Image (tube, rainbow, N blue to C red):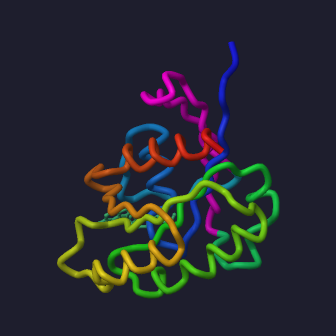
């Protein structure tokens, strides 16, 4: 039986929750005191996508701490079919960096299916990004926008389902 396979990359500054997100999707876990696993390139997860009526195999690639622009190698982007652009509710720089991440990804994987994600909405009380500016950025980049909390497991699954559908439709 044919298995659809999608390589998913998750990009954004260090600390926005990329590794936590991948682990949440792959295993349903959130671990607060998680230490980055050296040498693990990706996690695999099979996800049933309702609207497709089929299982899709996701290869979830973490930048593994190589967030500085030039440290992320071509191998990371090669063959990617879907991209999460992630910033954090409590990190202004991570929001400002999204345009650069987008340019970098588009240079390596033009036209890739993608979403804009604001993580850590459980910390909205200490937000440093207004809803208006986040939505304006999503419009400017023509990306669907999700507010999620990996910690509280809010909106993570719907965001991934949308992304995978968009990727498979391409
Ligand atoms: P990465 O550097 O982008 O891979 O980020 P990590 O996944 O290592 O997460 C950085 C920190 O943010 C860790 O302490 C996580 O536990 C924490 N974190 C991740 N997601 C959330 C979230 O939704 N809410 C809160 N409050 N903390 C989070």
Name the residue located 45 percent from the left edge and 54 percent from the top edge.
21
Please tell me which residue lies in front, 44 or 103: 103
Locate residue 86 relative to residue 102 in the image: left or right: left
Find the residue positioned furthest to the left.
Answer: 125
Where the N terminus falls, by quadrant? top right
Name the residue located 45 percent from the left edge and 74 percent from the top edge.
139
Q: Quadrant of ligand 1?
A: bottom left
Q: From which residue to which does the magenta span run? A: 40-65
89 vs 63: above or below: below
70 vs 8: above or below: below
Name the residue located 38 percent from the left edge and 68 percent from the top edge.
118
Please tell me which residue lies in front, 108 or 41: 108
Find the residue positioned furthest to the top.
Answer: 1
Residue 103 on the magenta segment? no
| Residue 11, picture quadrant | bottom right
Residue 57 on the magenta segment? yes
Locate residue 12 relative to residue 92 in the image: left or right: right
Main secondary structure type of the part rendered in magenta: strand
Please tell me which residue lies in front, 170 or 81: 170
Name the residue located 39 percent from the left edge and 73 percent from the top edge.
88
* Residue 64 percent location from the top left of the image: 63, 61
* Residue 15 percent location from the top left of the image: 47, 72
């Amino acid at each position: 039986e044919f298995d659809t396979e999608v390589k998913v990359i998750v990009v954004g500054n260090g600390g926005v929750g990329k590794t936590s997100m991948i682990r949440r999707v792959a295993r349903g876990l959130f671990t607060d005191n998680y230490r980055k696993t050296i040498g693990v390139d990706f996690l695999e997860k099979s996800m049933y996508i309702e609207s497709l009526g089929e299982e899709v195999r996701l290869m979830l690639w973490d930048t593994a701490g190589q967030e500085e622009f030039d440290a992320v190698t071509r191998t990371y982007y090669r063959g990617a079919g879907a991209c999460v652009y992630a910033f954090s509710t409590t990190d202004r720089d991570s929001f400002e960096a999204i345009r650069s991440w987008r340019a970098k990804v588009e240079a390596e994987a033009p036209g890739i299916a993608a979403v804009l994600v604001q993580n850590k909405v459980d910390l909205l009380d200490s937000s440093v990004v207004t809803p208006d500016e986040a939505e304006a950025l999503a419009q400017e980049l023509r990306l669907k926008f999700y507010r999620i909390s990996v910690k509280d497991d809010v909106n993570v699954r719907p965001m991934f389902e949308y992304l995978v559908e968009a990727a498979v439709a391409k």
